[in-house]
Image (spheres, rainbow, N blue to C red):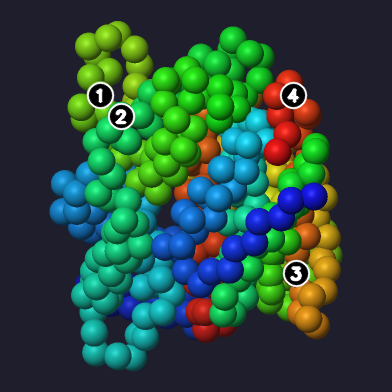
Amino acid sequence: MPADRTEKALLRRYHEHGDLAAREQLIEKYMALVRSLARRYSYRGEQHEDLVQIGAIGLIKAIDRFDVNRGVELSTYATRNIIGEIKRHFRDKGWSVRVPRGLQELNVQLSRLIEQLTVQLGRSPTIPELAKAASVEEELVLEALESGRAYNSVSLSAGGGSDEDGELDPLESIGTEEPQYEISEDWAVLSPGFRVLDDRERMILHLRFFKGLTQSQIANQVGISQMHVSRLIRRALEKIRAEVNVQEEAPSP
Amino acid sequence: MDEVTLKLPRDPSFYPVVHLVLGGLASRMNLTWENLQDLEVALDSLLERGEGDVTIALRVREDAIQALVGPVDSELEEELGRDPGREVGLRRILDTVVDRVEITERDGQPWVDLTKRFPVTAGSGA
């Protein structure tokens, strides 16, 4: 069967019969396109993987809203939606993609200080404690934390020189290989939103919202910085919200 | 009891303003970074729930911050009353990150009333 007919068959299976496996197949098929488009925008300072996640939301919306009977190809429609989602992300975060370098560096420094002070104090540090440790005003700490999260802690490692001082950049501490998490069978029956998450995001949400672990406990268990855990939790919740919104908007199959 | 009130459009580009105000209070109250994150997650989950402007009233107590957020959409009340089951829905998120969640009514519309308690440490207090 030609590729486009297979695609249409999958779309019909999903839209007309509610076949979620068909939807999954379409998502998988087009993830390469998402990665390719995300790469185009990575130069703006966002981490490629973050843009892939954002682009994936555009793809899912495209698949859900696509009208099989219109004379448009899904690839065209999906491209427009993926780029639209990425551009919207940049527009929404517009104020933050111009974060001054000083704030970016302070953000990286704060991430390290949060780790150090948590060990020293036996609890999460307060803002005044962070300000004192970084020798800056409390307002600047808040600004750096906020800019860092809105900015998705963008490529701070680019100039951070994690290799130079031998310290592991907290934002990069995961590396390229994903740890193999033990994914319980429960995942399969979790809420629909969970389907849009990767294994690490599911794991972290599970530990936070089902097991009740704190961010610092999760950071210890998973082996990443607390700031990174915080960022992943936010991103995962945003993805679930986006997915739920799409489900609500999509016609009932 | 001190209160800080913010009224802003339900637009994600304004949410950083909420975080900065919340951060300012957290700093003044000696809240930990982790507690501040929890409060931000709680408020973020509510900001989009409704039409028009959203108002956030932050009340500072000796050992807690109370946030009144509203008006919120009518489905929210039903959602909060539901057993969260296996969903990472609003109920589960809020139950995890704050200590008390209630629906209250203001001008005939539902608002969410949150309380996050924190241990009083030396030097804390507004």
Q: Residue at x 30, y 90 (%)?
A: A70
Circles 3, 2 touching at the beta carbon (< 8 Å): no
Identify residue type, mark 1: Gly
**Given this view, does label 4 or label 1 mark the residue nearer the observer?**
4
User: Between marks 2 and 4, how big is the CA–CA gap?
Assistant: 29 Å
Circles 2, 1 touching at the beta carbon (< 8 Å): yes
A67 vs A207, left or right, is left
Have a look at marks 3 and 4 and say if they share a chain.
yes
| Residue B30 shows up from this direction | yes
Other-residue count near label 1 (Cα within 10 Å), few / some / many at <14 / 14–19 / ≥20: some
Residue behind mark 4: B121
Estimate the x, y position of residue A93 in percent, counting from the top left.
34, 57
Q: Residue at x 63, y 13 (%)?
A: A121
A33 vs A226, nearest the viewer: A226
**Given this view, does label 2 or label 1 mark the residue nearer the observer?**
2
Residue behind mark 3: B111
Have a look at marks 2 and 1 and say if they share a chain.
yes
Estimate the x, y position of residue A244 in percent, counting from the top left.
56, 67
User: Between marks 4 and 1, how big is the CA–CA gap?
Assistant: 34 Å
